[in-house]
């Protein structure tokens, strides 16, 4: 079978004007070079060079063959280069998902940008619930997830690293009777309507909030309109009810809403990065680099 090396030898002979000049450029013996071209001719079934004169030249078939090989080798070089980049993880598309209660702040975007430049990868970012992220990771539909525990699904097949904890705040309308308080005890929310309460099949922030209420001796009352996403702040702005949210919601706070600190123990919510234990080296390098950036 004709080889990539033989094609390169053919191109060099033509470009250098003969076997002697080409062998000097290629640092191989002229006899070895001649033997390789003869093997190539035997393989393709026709003479590439006319050897009837002292100065060899391409046959008519050889001229066509040389032109086609040269053009296609340029494409092949490009294909090989791109394939090597893929093997090295360069320009790899990394699929990221985050819970809607984890805001894409400027700081987070900068981490993704730094990781992209440092490791020559690309990112696609979408929103999924913490529970759906775990399922998507196990199916290979996403590469890295950002979740807020607790979650109902098991994490046995995933790596999980806490990036940072966040204090929780009560989000109130500015006209609410408690909006001027410096801090609020969880018990003071006993009679409030919560615009975010747990889904029967999902964990996440609303599940954590419900547990806080239960530990204070009551179940959160459901508001008439509910949301477990960042739109819950719009419901608070419309005076439909209250919610308990992490500190980073401050970046997307409607002007009618106030955040008041919770005066209680264990009022923190962790942001956790998760990825499959079966992830390849590219994903592992990405997660290691991002963890360092987030925990600086």
Image (cartoon, helix red, strand yellow):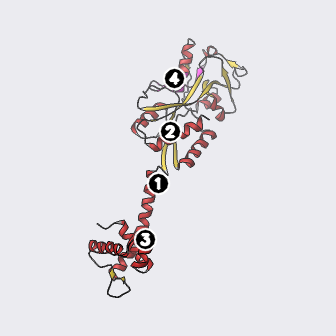
Q: Residues within 10 Å of mark 3 (few under 14, many from 20)?
A: some
* Residue under label 2: 97
Q: Is residue 59 left or right of residue 293?
A: left
Would you name the residue on which mark 3 appears?
A: 26
Q: Residue at x 26, y 75 (%)?
A: 45
Whichever of callouts 1 and 2 sits on the residue coming sooner in the sequence is 1
**Quadrant into which the C terminus falls:** top right
30 left or right of 203 in image: left
Q: Which residue is mark 1?
A: 85
Q: Quadrant of residue 52?
A: bottom left
Residue 283 inside the magenta-drawn segment = no
Confirm or deny contact between disc 4 and disc 1 (CB under 8 A): no
**Residue 277 locus on image (x, y percent):** 42, 35
Mark 1 or mark 2: which is in front? 1
- Cβ–Cβ under 8 Å for marks 3 and 1: no
Drawn side of residue 57 relative to residue 124, left or right: left
Front residue of this view, candidates 1 and 218: 1
């Amino acid at each position: 079978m004709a080889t990539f090396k033989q094609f390169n030898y053919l191109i060099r002979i033509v470009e250098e004007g003969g076997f002697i000049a080409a062998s000097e450029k290629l640092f191989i013996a002229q006899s070895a070079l001649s033997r390789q071209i003869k093997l190539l001719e035997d393989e393709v079934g026709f003479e590439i060079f006319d050897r009837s004169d002292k100065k060899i030249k391409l046959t008519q078939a050889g001229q066509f063959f040389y032109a086609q090989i040269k053009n296609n080798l340029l494409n092949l070089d490009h294909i090989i280069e791109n394939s090597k980049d893929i093997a090295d993880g360069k320009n790899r598309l990394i699929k990221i998902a985050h819970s809607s209660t984890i805001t894409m702040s400027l700081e987070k975007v900068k981490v993704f940008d730094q990781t992209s430049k440092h490791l020559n990868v690309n990112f696609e970012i979408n929103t999924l619930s913490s529970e759906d992220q775990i399922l998507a990771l196990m199916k290979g539909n996403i590469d890295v997830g950002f979740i807020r525990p607790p979650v109902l699904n098991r994490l046995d097949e995933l790596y999980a690293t806490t990036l940072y904890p966040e204090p929780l705040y009560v989000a109130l309308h500015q006209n609410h009777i408690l909006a001027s308080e410096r801090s609020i005890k969880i018990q003071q929310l006993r009679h409030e309507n919560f615009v975010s309460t747990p889904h029967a099949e999902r964990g996440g922030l609303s599940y954590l909030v419900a547990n806080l209420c239960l530990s204070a001796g009551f179940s959160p009352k459901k508001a008439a309109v509910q949301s477990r996403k960042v739109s819950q702040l719009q419901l608070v702005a419309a005076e439909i009810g209250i919610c308990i949210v992490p500190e980073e919601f401050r970046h997307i706070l409607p002007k009618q809403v106030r955040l008041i600190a919770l005066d209680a123990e264990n009022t923190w919510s962790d942001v956790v990065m998760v990825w499959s234990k079966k992830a390849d080296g590219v994903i592992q390098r990405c997660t290691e680099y991002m963890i360092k950036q987030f925990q600086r």
